[in-house]
């Protein structure tokens, strides 16, 4: 169990910062500096990780992953973000990072266009900009780490639902808001996969839980009552997953209506245990934080004369003289090994956009989704 | 439902609590009753139920009825608190984070240390009263206009809620909470609605049958006159915010039991501010103070919850649902004939007249 910290302790160390933090747009930061001996021969670089806002479990999991590898990558690390999901808040953070001469800025963008000028200013100043999770305009970043391929995760969810409910069933989708970019992309990918593979599977409605559990709960309950033939509900947003499972459990439909979604296993342990949740898909958020830091190092090396990462199997644990670099102007696919931060396999940076996976230029697709089921959910702590 | 039906008109001399515009007693009794907003709402709730079940037979199935009622209770309890503040001619825009802080304040200890539900009840009431006292201090002691004071605390409390969660979510509450949040006393009668009805009954009694309660109406009607008549206006205003906070805190516990989770944005993300004010307005409480009551607000909350499920059942495209709720609020405000914009803008904080009571 990761949530062993008590509420009291949580209060204790945070109350001191409360006065400074309550104002809108206040930020807080976590920093870690490697001891000089840690990364022998590697120049220490300053890398900032700037998620959409503080306090979301997904971004905390990214941070956890990043913190576990900054030591061996010779990174002086800072985690900072606005207190609310505010694009303007991110802009002022980027400005201050530029002033502090950071080497690499990694970010999950609150808005794709608002931070463009400030990030372009950063790139002009020689700072490598890497977006992850939520991209900015391509002109304002060097690389983007996409969570997972849209088609793979959509196929995972649909295949699991069909296995449970059959290829002719009625299913419903529970999303976040009607304008959420990534959810729209997933819904699109689900629809095209259904059209190609299961033409008799019918999506009867798409409910919107507005990214909160209470609205998701009401919506899912309404769907269960209003569409009695629905055999599976597919929640594709963290709050929708919890709300849908809660609705199925509250209406005693556990096991009769399948719930297959996209979300973390930890918040849903209860629903896996009582049988109201059958399957979830997600990338490894902790691992994604590690990859982000590895990319930061490689991008820095690429900009400072290291040879191009081209071989499909670069050394797993490069000595300082063996580091390769990644750059945006090589114009062809680049490959690097994840073993340096404990990630299995080789990653590729696509030089061109790919409509099926959703990848844009200079994008790394982080991983295939993990599948969490009633038999394996206990193994994961995010 | 019967527990919520409209009370008979009070026979006490102070007329302030009357919902009808003129409280004419000469007309036929039935017609007079139809003017009461509570009765109108009961009829509207029944009519909407009948209409929806004609479109979709399972709408009035006991499972759905019980869900609609249970889903309305956290809004209901907060709306009753909001009503008390509005009756005193104030407004409380900080109920969202008060509900949220209460929900996480007991949610984490419940999840990590199996906090008992009775202790949780005590804690949310204390949290709610403390935060409400903050509002009361700014409005009644410092004299800041309510809309500004509670907008400020909305931000402050929202920030605190954020800090307290530290990026964690409450996701795994003990069964005792979930059972209270979703179990039924009888088919179609969830335990939560019993809790809601009890709160409404207590507040109704307090407002109608005690001196302090009646004074809130008097203060809301005319604070200067109430002051001259010897009512401790500042103390009463302070009290309305404390009770509003207390009920918002209770709403947080009810939310936690019903929804089963809570996080940094709980309360704000479901627009508890707006929904509580909407329920009060739909229930016949006017923003001008001095008129309305908890029964109407409770029925307003049930009506909002029913309307949402009716929209889903009648296959209104989900994208239109927020617009539907907004339309209900507009209708409620239009039918609230006393609340013209000019009179709303004329609202000002209470100041003791320079020449005190004789």
Image (spheres, coloured by chain):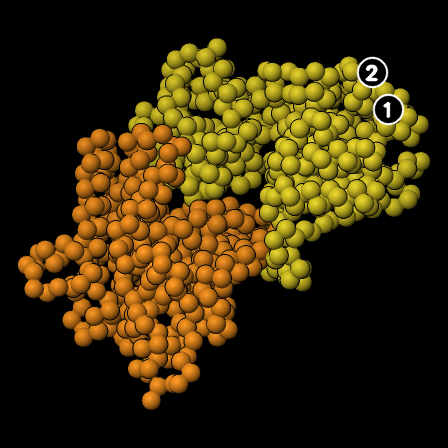
Out of A35 and B33, give the one closest to the viewer: B33
Q: Position of residue B352 (x, y in %)?
A: 41, 79
Label 1 close to label 2 by CB (< 8 Å): yes
- Residue named by callout 1: A324
Give the CA separation, mark 1 to mark 2: 10 Å
Tell me if residue B124 can be seen. no
Please identify the quarter of the rendering in which residue B340 is found: bottom left
Q: Position of residue B261 (x, y in %)?
A: 48, 47
Chain (orange)? B
Ranked by sequence position, the earlier of labels 1 and 2 is 2
Q: Colour of chain A?
A: yellow
**Identity of the residue drawn at 83% across and 16% down:** A311
Q: What residue occupies the far front of the structure in this picture?
A: B342
Work out whether A359 lies above or below B179.
above
Compared across the picture, whether B52 is left or right of B171 comes to: left
Tell me if residue A209 can be seen. yes
**Identity of the residue drawn at 90% across and 35% down:** A42
Crowding at mark 2 (Cα within 10 Å: few <14, some 14-19, many 20+): few
Circle 2 sits in a helix, a strand or a loop, which is it? loop
**Identity of the residue drawn at 38% across and 74% down:** B236
Report the number of numbered marks.
2
Compared across the picture, whether A71 is left or right of A237 comes to: right
Work out whether B229 lies above or below A65.
below
Out of A369 and A297, give the one closest to the viewer: A297
Compared across the picture, whether A222 is left or right of B129 comes to: left
Crowding at mark 1 (Cα within 10 Å: few <14, some 14-19, many 20+): many
Please identify the quarter of the rendering in which residue B59 is found: top left
- Residue named by callout 2: A311
Work out whether B96 lies above or below B129.
above
Chain of the residue that carries numbered disc 2 in the rendered image: A
Circle 1 sits in a helix, a strand or a loop, which is it? loop
Q: Position of residue B80 (x, y in %)?
A: 33, 60
């Amino acid at each position: 169990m990761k949530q062993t910290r008590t509420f009291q302790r949580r209060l204790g160390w945070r109350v001191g910062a409360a006065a400074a933090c309550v104002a809108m747009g206040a930020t807080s930061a976590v920093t870690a500096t490697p001891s000089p001996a840690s990364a022998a021969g590697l120049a220490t670089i300053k890398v900032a990780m700037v998620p959409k806002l503080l306090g979301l479990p997904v971004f905390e999991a990214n941070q956890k992953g990043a913190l576990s590898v900054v030591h061996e990558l010779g990174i002086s690390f800072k985690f900072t973000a606005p207190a609310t999901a505010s694009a303007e808040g991110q802009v002022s953070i980027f400005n201050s990072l530029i002033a502090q001469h950071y080497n690499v800025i990694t970010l999950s963008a609150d808005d794709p266009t608002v931070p463009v000028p400030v990030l372009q200013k950063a790139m002009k100043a020689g700072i490598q900009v890497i977006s992850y999770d939520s991209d900015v305009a391509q002109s304002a970043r060097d690389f983007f780490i996409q969570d997972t391929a849209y088609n793979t995760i959509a196929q995972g969810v649909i295949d699991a639902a069909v296995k449970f409910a059959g290829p002719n069933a009625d299913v419903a989708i529970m999303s976040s808001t009607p304008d959420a970019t990534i959810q729209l992309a997933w819904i699109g990918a689900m629809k095209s996969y259904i059209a190609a593979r299961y033409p008799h599977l019918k999506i009867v409605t798409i409910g919107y839980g507005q990214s909160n559990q209470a609205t998701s709960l009401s919506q899912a309950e309404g769907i269960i009552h209003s569409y009695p033939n629905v055999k599976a509900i597919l929640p594709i947003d963290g709050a929708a997953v919890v709300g849908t499972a809660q609705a199925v459990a509250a209406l005693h439909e556990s096991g009769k209506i399948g719930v297959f979604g996209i979300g973390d296993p930890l918040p849903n342990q209860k629903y896996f245990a009582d049988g109201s949740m059958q399957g979830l898909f997600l990338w490894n958020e902790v691992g994604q934080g590690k990859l982000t830091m590895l990319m930061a190092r490689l991008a820095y090396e690429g900009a400072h004369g290291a040879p191009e990462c081209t071989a499909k199997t670069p050394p797993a644990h490069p000595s300082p003289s063996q580091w390769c670099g990644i750059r945006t102007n090589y114009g062809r696919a680049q490959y690097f090994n994840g073993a340096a931060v404990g990630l299995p396999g080789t990653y590729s940076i696509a030089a061109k956009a790919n409509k099926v996976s959703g990848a844009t230029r200079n994008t790394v697709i982080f991983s295939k989704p993990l599948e969490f089921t009633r038999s394996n959910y206990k193994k994961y702590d995010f | 439902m019967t527990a919520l039906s409209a009370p008979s008109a009070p026979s006490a001399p102070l007329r302030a609590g009357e919902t009808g515009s003129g409280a004419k007693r000469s007309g036929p009794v039935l017609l007079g009753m139809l003017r009461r907003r509570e009765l109108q709402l009961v009829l509207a709730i029944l009519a909407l139920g009948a209409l929806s079940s004609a479109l979709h037979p399972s709408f009035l199935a006991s499972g759905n009825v019980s869900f609609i009622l249970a889903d309305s209770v956290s809004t209901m309890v907060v709306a009753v608190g909001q009503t008390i503040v509005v009756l005193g001619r104030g407004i409380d825009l900080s109920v969202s984070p008060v509900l949220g802080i209460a929900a996480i304040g007991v949610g984490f200890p419940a999840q990590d240390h199996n906090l008992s539900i009775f202790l949780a009840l005590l804690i949310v009431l204390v949290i709610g009263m403390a935060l409400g006292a903050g509002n009361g201090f700014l409005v009644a002691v410092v004299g800041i206009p309510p809309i500004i004071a509670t907008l400020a605390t909305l931000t402050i409390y929202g920030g605190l809620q954020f800090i307290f969660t530290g990026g964690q979510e409450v996701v795994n509450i003990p069964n005792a909470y979930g059972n209270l949040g979703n179990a039924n006393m009888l088919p179609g009668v969830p335990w939560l609605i019993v809790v809601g009805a009890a709160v409404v009954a207590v507040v109704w009694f307090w407002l109608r049958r005690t001196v302090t309660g009646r004074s809130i109406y008097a203060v809301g009607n005319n604070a200067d006159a109430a002051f001259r008549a010897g009512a401790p206006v500042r103390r009463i205003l302070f009290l309305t915010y404390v009770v509003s906070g207390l009920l918002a805190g209770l709403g947080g516990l009810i939310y936690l039991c019903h929804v089963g989770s809570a996080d940094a944005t709980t309360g704000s993300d479901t627009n508890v501010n707006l929904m509580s004010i909407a329920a009060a307005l739909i229930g016949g409480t006017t923003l001008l103070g001095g008129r309305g009551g908890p029964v109407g607000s409770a029925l307003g909350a049930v009506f909002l919850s029913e309307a949402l499920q009716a929209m889903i059942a009648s296959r209104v495209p989900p994208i239109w649902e927020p617009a539907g709720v907004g339309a209900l609020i507009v209708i409620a405000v239009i039918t609230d004939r006393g609340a013209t914009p000019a009179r709303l803008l004329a609202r000002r904080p209470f100041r003791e007249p320079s020449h005190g009571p004789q």
